[in-house]
Amino acid sequence: MNKIFIIGAGIMGRGIAQVCAEAGNEVYLTNQPLDLLYSSMEIIRRGLQRLVEKGKISELQLNDIMDRIHPVEDYGKTAEVDLVIEAVPEDVQLKQKIFRELDEISPVSVILASNTTSCSITEIASAVKNPERVVGMHFFNPPTLMRLVEIMPGLLTNEKTVESVRKVATGLGKEPVVTAKEGVAGVTSRILAGLLNEAVWVLNDGIADVEAIDKAVVLGCNHKMGPLALIDLIGIDTHYAKTRMLFEKTGDLRYRPCYLLEQMVKAGLLGKKSGKGFYDYSSEPPVQMNIFKK
């Protein structure tokens, strides 16, 4: 497989595109609205330019990588690729709509993968005539640095599809983990969701402020990043959607999303991508938002 089509040019999609291009693949990247598509191409270039300035890659390598990423405005090229990776927001109906469209124009030999963290692969696959070719392929944020790729079959996914995607992940320099079966949010996201959710409840209950919670987990649990800073990096809207989905699917109170998350989403406090979340990113280093200070 050396031709990959990626749908969604947000933080995850553009990161996956860069990883695929760095591994020598021809990559087609699309997004609606289109302005994000072209701004993401510039973000990829600026990130690579920083690597040039640090001496980690050459200017020639930068140009080669960028030449392998092709911004496209529709799904036409999906008829010519080996693998499609969908990386749009966590909305199962949106994903089904996309996969239904892909099913109409892409040959059955093309593998359709979703980067979802919480939506059911089986539900997504129900939108296509050949659910055997649909699989979960979950990269972690940021895709350019995180080595793990979780691969999850749906109820009807073919073993050959799983093995093909495992080989692709290995070829990208990643360490794949293949789940034995489909489970809500897989392995890492499910475990992590409970931890992150509890951190928000600790904040909401007034036990400690943002900086204290993050410092306690970093120093006490030897984590590289505090849980609230991590939610800001993931995206508060993304984390909220994931915990809500987990709670709906499992009924487990560990995943009951705190009302504070819903308030923050409605207030536009989405984390790092919006400039403000639990922290204010307008300064360096970021500082916790005044509304959370004790």
Image (spheres, rainbow, N blue to C red):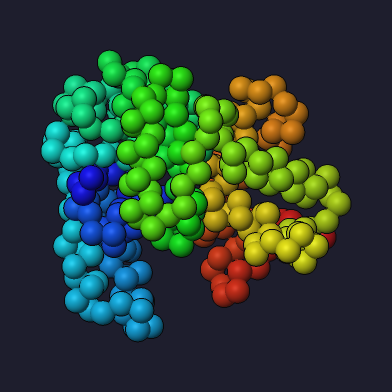
Give coordinates of residue 33: x percent, y percent: 28, 43
85 with respect to 104 (left or right): right
The quadrant of the picture occupied by the C terminus is bottom right
71 sits left or right of 244 in the view: left
Q: Which residue is depicted at the point 65% across and 45% down?
A: 192
Q: How many labels does the image show?
A: 0
Residue 43, relative to residue 1: is it above or below? below
Residue found 62% across the figure and 23% down from its top? 248
Which one is nearer the viewer's eye here, 266 or 227? 227
Residue 55 falls left or right of residue 217: left
Kindly indicate the quadrant of the structure image that contains residue 195. Answer: top right
Question: Horizontal and vertical percent for residue 220?
Answer: 80, 62
Quadrant where the image shows the N terminus? top left
Which residue: 18% across, 58% down?
Answer: 68
Task: Tell me what residue is drawn at x 28 percent, y 33 percent.
Answer: 111
Residue 81 in sight here? yes
The quadrant in which residue 112 appears is top left
**Where is residue 121 drawn, in percent x and y?**
44, 26
Nearer to me, 266 or 107: 107
